Image (cartoon, helix red, strand yellow):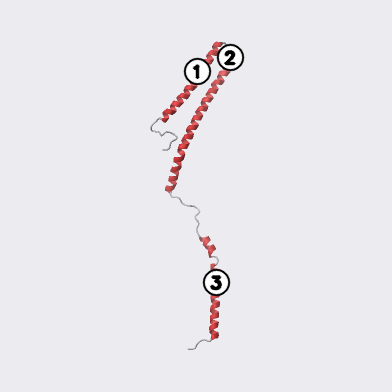
Amino acid sequence: MSQPSLYTTSRIFEDSVDLLGSSLESLESATKDIPRLKQVLDTQKVFGLVPESDLKNAQARLKNETHPQITYLIEKLQKEVARLQRKKMSLESDFNLRKVRLEMVGKGADSDKEAKYEKLRMLRTKRDRLKYSLSRQRLQNYRSIPSLPPPGRDS
């Protein structure tokens, strides 16, 4: 067998090194963009899915937390409205009484009429107090109904 000469062997070796070098360059150019591609192709969760049971539990919890507060605030507003209505009626009756007194002063009314108007004012005041007592009694009766839970408490 004939062995190739040293020159031929070195030439083949140089060609192999050149081929390996060009292959390495091709491989580097093909793979240098991989980190960016990995990030581009990586899927990202934009919206997380929540199970329906968790959603319903959160809604029930929110309802249980807010319902007593809302009930309390509604009752508070109703009491304030009732108080303001009583105050309005009281001011109206006081206005009417003063208006009548002014008219009486202008006409020179006698003391008998003044006594009647004083009695009328007292009766109106008594009527307002009785209305207030009646509204309080109705509220107490409403609260004492056993089928309804007392307002302001957690169920």
Tell me the distance, in whole angstroms, between the alpha carbons under discs 2 and 1.
Answer: 19 Å
Give the mark nearest the N terminus, 2 or 1: 2
Task: Point out the residue furthest to the front here.
Answer: 153
Amino acid type, label 2: Met
Residue 26, given in percent of the width and then of the height, sits at: 55, 71
Residue placed under numbered mark 2 in the picture: 104
For the residue labelled by badge 3, is the local secondary structure a helix, a strand or a loop?
helix
106 versus 40 height, above or below: above
Residue at mark 3 to residue at mark 1: CA–CA distance: 108 Å
Expressed as whole percent of the image width and height from the top left, the position of residue 29 reads 56, 69
In the image, farthest residue toward the left = 146
Q: Is 133 on the left or on the right of 32, as rendered? A: left
Which residue is at a point 59% across and 15% down the rendered structure image? Answer: 103
- For the point 53% across and 83% down, the residue is 9
| Residue 70 rendering spot, x and y as whole percentages | 47, 36
Identify the residue under disc 3: 26
Element under label 1? helix
Q: Residues within 10 Å of mark 2 (few under 14, many from 20)?
A: some
Q: Residue at x 54, y 84 (%)?
A: 8
**Badge nearest the viewer, 3 or 1:** 1
Whether 112 is drawn above or below 91: the answer is above
Q: Are marks 2 and 1 in contact (CB under 8 Å)?
A: no
Judging by the rendered image, the residue that carries numbered circle 1 is 123
For the C terminus, which image quadrant? Answer: top left
Of labels 2 and 3, earlier in sequence is: 3
User: Residue 102's image quarter?
Assistant: top right
Which three-letter amino acid code belongs to the residue tagged 3? Ser
